[in-house]
Image: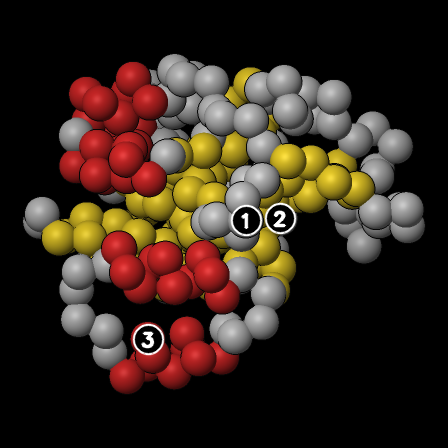
Amino acid sequence: MCGRYYITPAALREAAELAEGPETEKDTAQRDKDTAQRDVCPGESAPVLLARGLRTESVRMTWGFPRQEGKGLLINARAETAWEKPTFRDSIHSRRCVILAGGFYEWNREKEKYTFRRADGTAVFLAGCYNRYRDGDRFVILTVPANASVAAVHDRMPLILEAEELEDWLLDTGAAKKITEKIPAALKGETEYAQMSLFE
């Protein structure tokens, strides 16, 4: 699973470079506020990339689909089953997005926090899909079985996209299905001496 991730100014700059749509004054003001690294938790708004026609745009969405029973949020979708599962099927077929991050966190069984990022510090692109609700668009992060760099901490991890896969993920459903079957590239994992609870 992925229950928290973080955004860096470098990731936001990469998003701005990839986006082709016009940036509004509101977008610029929000990006200027995000000048320091910050964590993103479920229920919060964050920048994502999506396709409008053949153009890539950066927009803000809320993380998490409301649960049908009205309590809590669905924040992740298993890539293996999302194509058929009613909750996510329409979204992954026609409303895919890319979540911009500097890295993400996982907690092991002892509730020790680990940070995962690319070794070179470049942006981490998380595969996602979104849906439309009365209060605005909301996204979930797709997860896959953990690769060797994450497996010792958790058995699931976000589906990581490479830069050259972004266009296919957003625009080509056939290619996107193949991407959900891949093993994500290795990441650098770090932990802190101070333990931190997932539920702090």
Which image quarter is the N terminus in? top right
The residue carrying pointer 1 sits among few (fewer than 14), some (14 to 19) or many (20 or more) residues within 10 Å by Cα, namely: few
Q: Tell me the amino acid under the disc marked 2.
A: Arg
As helix, strand or loop, the secondary structure at mark 1 comes to loop
Residue 188, can we see it?
A: yes
As helix, strand or loop, the secondary structure at mark 3 comes to helix
The residue carrying pointer 2 sits among few (fewer than 14), some (14 to 19) or many (20 or more) residues within 10 Å by Cα, namely: some
Q: Tell me the amino acid under the disc marked 1.
A: Gly
**Image position, residue 81 (x, y; %):** 41, 18
Residue on which the image places disc 3: 27
Which image quarter is the C terminus in? bottom right
Distance Cα–Cα, label 3 vs label 2: 23 Å
The reply to whether callout 1 and callout 3 are in contact (CB within 8 Å) is no
Q: Nearer the viewer, mark 1 or mark 3?
A: 1
User: Which sits earlier in the primary sequence, circle 3 or circle 2?
Assistant: 2
- Give the residue drawn at x 50%, y 73%: 34
Residue on which the image places disc 2: 4
Question: Left of 83 or right of it: where is 126?
Answer: right
